[in-house]
Image: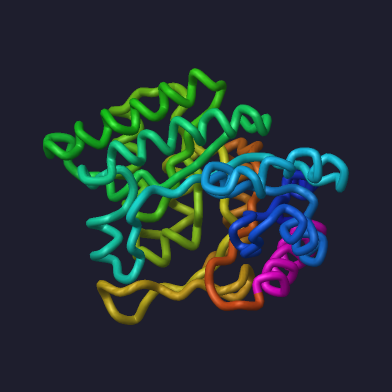
Amino acid sequence: MGVVSNPQRFLSRIAVCSWSLQASDPATLIQRMRAAGFHRVQLDLDPFREHPSVWDPAPKMFADEGIAPVSGMFRTVGEDYSTLETIRVTGGIVPDATWEQNLANARITARNAERLGLKFVMFHAGFLPHDAADPSFEKLASRVRTIARMFADHGLTLGCETGQETAESLRNFLEALGEPNVAVNFDPANMLLYGNGDPIDAVRLVGRWVRGVHMKDARVTDVPGTWGTELPVGRGQVDWPAFLRALEEIGFDGDLCFEREAENQRVEDLRAGREFIEQLLRG
């Protein structure tokens, strides 16, 4: 028996994160996708907002080349990933100083995502308060709710990326939020990078919200309070057979989007990770 009972269910949903390929224009993105062996893509939507003259031709180019955009991502203003503490302070829609700009950017992004035919767009909301009684809990919930309802007007599901909190904290936040179009984009490597628990246990805990997955690998840090190390898929501490089985258990039917955010041999690392998972699935 293979890793999962229906491997084709996963093999047909493999995609790549466009930002991992560091392409400054659609033609380069398509070329690098081909080199890495992908024809489905999760799009970084910021370039569509920031450089429309470069990226507006992308939909036709994708269609001509048989490239299928499957979902999207957007960043928030002022994120600083230098250390765990800097991203805790600057990440997502938590900081008051950047909230209005983030809201304005999200409004444009929602329109662009709808124009591109996307249904699922993810982002990092920021560090979620662990205690619902914390005043910042309701502030962040209100901001996520505002963006979620804006996205709902465009037929979009808003995905919150995992990692910056435990799965239990995320589940509690989503239950309190109660917005039907807010889901989870699950990244097993982020659980290890942030030191927030076992990815297999975590995906089961938030399973009913999981609509997207980032295929990324990592190992935990040896120095508490510092980042873990991102690695190519198959070379870190994610138990991929167990993770894929857990996805099947929760009935996951979204996309497996390969992501690589470290080092400079991105095409090679993404291709190797895809081949590793495909071989695992095919047995």
Q: Is residue 25 left or right of residue 88?
A: right
What count of labels does the image hold? 0
Is residue 253 visible in the rendered structure shown here?
yes
Is residue 208 visible in the rendered structure shown here?
no
Whether 111 is among the magenta residues is no
Q: Residue at x 24, y 65 (%)?
A: 85
In which quadrant of the rendered view does residue 169 lie? top left
Q: Is residue 237 left or right of residue 21?
A: left
Q: Residue at x 74, y 39 (%)?
A: 59
Q: Is residue 160 left or right of residue 26?
A: left
| Above or below: residue 191 compared with residue 185 | below
In which quadrant of the rendered view does residue 9 lie? top right
Whether 271 is among the magenta residues is yes
Q: Position of residue 203 (x, y in %)?
A: 48, 47
Q: Position of residue 153 (x, y in %)?
A: 49, 18
| Above or below: residue 104 compared with residue 22 | above
Q: Position of residue 96 (x, y in %)?
A: 20, 43
Looking at the image, which is closer to me, 199 or 215?
A: 215
Q: Residue at x 48, y 38 (%)?
A: 159
Q: Residue at x 58, y 66 (%)?
A: 260
Looking at the image, which is closer to me, 139 or 50?
A: 50
Q: Position of residue 141 (x, y in %)?
A: 27, 32
Give, as a single range, the part of the protein colored magenta.
266-282
